[in-house]
Amino acid sequence: MIKKEEISAKLLSLVKIADKKKKFISGFLKFLDNQGLKECVFYLKNEKKGCVEKFYLADGKYLKLDSIIEEDCDLKKIFSIHSKEKGYWKFEFDGEFLGFIIFKPKKKIKNFDEEIIVNLVNIVLKNFLIKERLDFEKEISKTLYQVNIDLSLYLELNNILKKIVESLKKIIDYNAVAIYILDHEKNNLKTLYFKGFPKKNLEKLKVKIGQGLVGLVAKNGKPYISMNVNNEKIYVKAREKTKSEIVVPIISKDKTIGILNLESNKLSQYSKKHLRILNAFASIAAIAIERSNLYRERIEKNKIERELEIAKQIQDRMIPKSFPKHNYFEIFGGTEPAEIVGGDFFDFLRVGDILYFVIADISGKGVPASLLVALFKSAFLIIFKKEKSFEEKVEEINSFVYENTESNQFITAIFGKIDGGNIELINCGHNYPLLYKGKRIYTLKKGNTILGFFKNYKYSSFNIKMNPENILFLYTDGLYESIGVLKKEIGLRGVKKYLNKYRDMSLPQIWNHILKDVKKISAGNLLDDFTILIVKRKK
């Protein structure tokens, strides 16, 4: 009799030598062949390729291992076909159907315990799945970082879109791709970039808003997944081989400006898990389209003035013009560049019931700093949507800055997390925040090192308790480095003086008065960008 301990030892030895799932399955089938089993079939879901793979052992005379990508990628449908056969066992993980195996012995094998074997294999497959998912997430992050870098390097829209679809191919399989832009005046969609469509069918890519799956998404602004396009009444056929399709809107400022469309030759190729990835790429495409539009509008102007003006408008769009509403806090911010564009930055991001905010100072001034601001903003919006702890999000931002900046570039920042009436801060080498509380102004001297200095730095956070009418005052060094008539910096004492002087005013009034005072003492010639972010506890 085959003992459970012997089976466990055998399978464990297979795991040690098999770094890939296919190697493990090959060894497992050989193991079954040695036990006298002459035939079995494996069906397993391949998440990365979005398909179902088939492995089998036949005849007993030889081991035949093959990876057959099923045309129908619906694992449950395939299972329903084979579930009437005897000897099948399912593999599951957290309620998710991973695959199944069918044992087909021509004669009963003495002491062959299928349940023991299947349970042990199920554990191994779970471990492979966890590793594959972690590797996949790393690949997604790495690809998105690279696309963001490419976005900062290229102004030509076609080059950027080409980079986007090439990078997307590494993560999501497709046979055809198209990116559209909406023309509301003509009520149609214009193709900006396409690949994989026959030239004779290009006219079919020209669709009206509301026409076909692409037109439907353009009309309602909601993503659409088709497991089988032949079941879609409004489907417009631009490729004979297309069997499944996924369409997502490209959104800018809460408005649909374009469409990203993927088509596959396989049924059921796409699922909801692909939406998160595709939406991230669509966000990058939105930035690319908006930036390209802005660039084209200014193409006739003087080169230097045009580039500066474009950079300024891009940066202006990055700075919030409206501020998030919150049950417990009022929030307001403002920034004033020393040149046409600057390197100061602040932003907000609501994820569920949590509101995140950030204020940052990029090293340098002018266009180089503004380009790094664009890169930092993209990283902030992508990384802070991930399901990680507050500290882990900041640590990933730090690694991103380290890997994508020169050695003489760095960023100081304060990240904030508002959860209900609680505020948590992580100070990354930034100026100490001030807290007005009980008619006193406290300097919160807690912090970490700057972003981008060490690759694997562990950041720590701290909580602050704010009572009604308390004010949290965040600022960049351009404020206290402002020079007065005596050619001296106003310093931290001067910043506290401003806060104490204007604390009873509304938050916009506090910003306006400080801005007016700083411009007055510097005679309108700021030496550095300065930014203020104010959070006040409501009564």
Image (cartoon, rainbow, N blue to C red):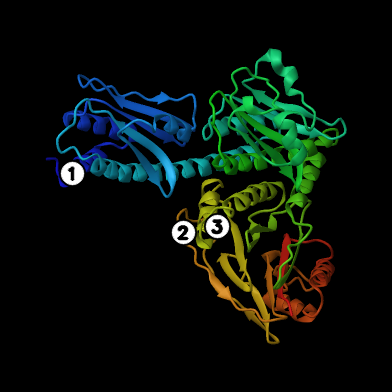
Which residue is the extreme one toward the top? 200
Name the residue nearer the viewer: 107 or 197. 107
Name the residue nearer the viewer: 473 or 109. 109
Q: Which residue was labeled with disc 1? A: 9
Residue 467 in the image: x percent, y percent?
67, 81
As helix, strand or loop, the secondary structure at mark 2 comes to: loop
Asked if marks 2 and 3 touch (Cβ < 8 Å), the reply is no
Q: Residues within 10 Å of mark 2 (few under 14, many from 20)?
A: some
As helix, strand or loop, the secondary structure at mark 1 comes to: helix
Instruction: Tell me the amino acid under the disc marked 3.
Output: Leu
Query: Relative to residue 349, is residue 283 depicted above or below?
Result: above
As helix, strand or loop, the secondary structure at mark 3 comes to: loop
Cα separation, mark 1 vs mark 3, equals: 47 Å
Which label belongs to residue 97?
Answer: none
Asked if marks 1 and 3 touch (Cβ < 8 Å), the reply is no
Residue 116 in the image: x percent, y percent?
24, 44
Query: Relative to residue 181, is residue 477 depicted above or below?
Result: below
Q: Residues within 10 Å of mark 1 (few under 14, many from 20)?
A: few
User: Dividing the picture into quarters, in which one does residue 107 lie?
Assistant: top left
Query: Relative to residue 397, is residue 426 depicted above or below?
Result: below
Q: Which residue was labeled with disc 2? A: 457
Asked whether, in this view, residue 66 is left or right of residue 514, the answer is: left
Q: Which residue was labeled with disc 3? A: 451
Which residue is found at the position 16% from the left and 47% from the top?
A: 5
